[in-house]
Amino acid sequence: MFFSFLFPVMLLLIFGTVFGATESVKYTLHIQNFDLDDGKPTNLSDALIKALDSTGTFDLESLDTNINITRYVKENPSFSSYRILIIPEGFEQTALNKSISVRMGVIIDTLVQIEELYGSYMNESERENITQGREALSQWKNATLTAESAELLLLTDQADQAAPIVKGIVYSVVNAFNNELIGGEEVVNIATQPLVERRLKPADYYLPGYIAAFIMTNGIIGVTSTVSEYRRNGTIKRIVATPLNKSSWILANVGQQTLLAFLLMIVMVGLGWLVFGVRALPDHYALSLIFIGAVTFCCIGIVLGGVIKDVEAATGAGNAIAFPMMFLSGAFWPVEMMPSYLQTVAKFLPLYYFHQGLRNIMIYQNPAEACVAFLVLGSLAIIFVLLAIKVTKWKDL
C-alpha cells in the first residue's frame, strides 16, 4: 500500500510544490559606497544604487566604509556566496569628467569630419574659424579633463554559479549609465511581442512520470516478491491443488496489476487536479497504454519470480532492474538534463516510452506521438506474456 499509493502521492506533492514555486529569484548584492559627500552618497552613486534596486533582481545590503572586505568575508561565513560591489571615492567626479571628455571628443571629431567632407565648399575664413575652434577645444580638453574612467569593483566567488547572471545585470545597468552620461541614444532597439503558448507546470511533467514509474515498480518489484513469497510459504502449492490452471493464475495476476494501475491513475490524477490544477483527463488512449504497461511489467515480474528460485535473489533482481530504470528513464526529470550517453541509455528502457507516451496523451493531448510507446510496450507485452507462460512451471510450484 505504501509503495503502491502513498509513496507516489508523497513524491507528487513534494516535487510539485518545490519545483512549482513561482516566486522570482533574487540575488543578494552587498554594496560598499565610498563616494560620499558629507557622509551621504553622491547623486551619481545614489542613482546607480537605485537603478540596481529598480531591476527587482537584487536584495541590496549596504556595507559600512570602515569594513575590511577580506576580513569581513572570512569572519562572517555564509552558505550563500558573497557578491560585493564597491563604489570608489571620487566616482561621481571621475565619471562626470570622463563624460565631458567624451562629449568634447565627439565634438572635435565632428569638426574634423566637417573640414574633410565640406571644407572644399567653404571659403578660407570659414575653414580658419573651424580649425581654430577645434584646436581651442582640444587644448582645453587636454588641459582640464582626464581620460581616466570611473571604475567600479565587483567581487564574486569563483564557485558562485549565479555570478555570471549577477555580472550581466550589473554590466547592463552600468552600460545604461554610460549612455546617459555621454548623451548617447539607442541605435538598436529590441521589440517585444507577447507569445501565446500553453504554459506547463512541473506537476504536468511529474504526473504521467509517477504513474508510469509506480506501475512499473508494482509489477517488477511487487509481483516478483509476491510470487517468490507464495512459493516460499506454500501458497502456490495449495493453489495448484485447486482446479485453477496456470493461464488463469497468470491472467489473475495481470488483472490485479491492471486494476491497481487504474486505481493509482485515479488517485494521482485526482490529486494533481485538486492540488496543482493539472487538467489531465485520461481518455481511451491513456487507459489502453496503462493497460499494456501494467501487463508488460506484471509479466516481467512473473518471469523473474519463475526463473529465480531463491526468494531474496528474486527480490534483489527486481530491485536491481526497477530502481535504475526509474531514475534513468527520465520519469522523475527530463532526460535532456542528463549527459548524452545516459540519454541514449534511457531510450533502451521501456519505462521511457511508457511515461513519454502517457505525457503525449494526457498532457500534450497528442495521441499520434504515442504510437512508438504503443509499439514498444505492445511488443514487450506479447514477449513477456509468452515468457511468463513458458517459465511458470505449474506442476513444480
Image (cartoon, rainbow, N blue to C red):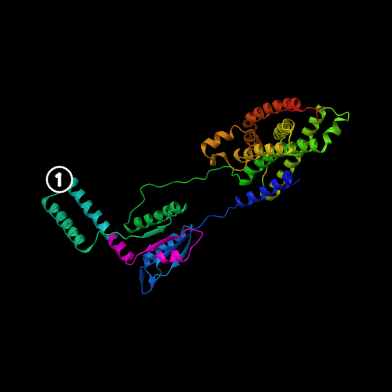
Say if residue 282 shows up in the picture: no
Occupied quadrant, residue 156: bottom left
The crowd level at tag 1 (other Cα within 10 Å; few <14, some 14-19, many 20+) is few
- For label 1, the SS is helix
Task: Say which residue appears at 57% left-offset and 42% top-offset.
Answer: 197
Q: Where does residue 323 sit, x and y in percent of width and height? A: 65, 40
Q: Amino acid at mark 1?
A: Ser
Residue located farthest toward the bottom when viewing the structure as drawn: 38
Task: Say which residue appears at 38% left-offset and 65% top-offset.
Answer: 45
Say if residue 47 shows up in the picture: yes
Mark 1 lies on residue: 120
Which range of residues does the magenta coloring cover? 69-98
Quadrant, the C terminus: top right
Asked whether, in this view, residue 207 is left or right of residue 50, the answer is right
Q: Nearer the viewer, residue 46 or 127?
A: 46
Occupied quadrant, residue 36: bottom left
Q: Where does residue 46 sit, x and y in percent of width and height? A: 40, 66
Q: Examine the structure image and report whether residue 73 is included in the region drawn in magenta.
A: yes
Q: Nearer the viewer, residue 130 or 287?
A: 287
Task: Say which residue appears at 64% left-offset and 46% top-offset.
Answer: 203
Task: Say which residue appears at 70% left-offset and 47% top-offset.
Answer: 7
Q: Nearer the viewer, residue 352 or 361?
A: 352
Q: Where does residue 390 sit, x and y in percent of width and height? A: 75, 25
Q: Examine the structure image and report whether residue 91 is included in the region drawn in magenta.
A: yes
Occupied quadrant, residue 298: top right
Q: Where does residue 200 sit, x and y in percent of width and height? A: 60, 44
User: Is the residue 167 above or below the residue 344 in the image?
Assistant: below
User: Is the residue 47 above or below the residue 338 in the image?
Assistant: below
Residue located farthest toward the left when viewing the structure as drawn: 124
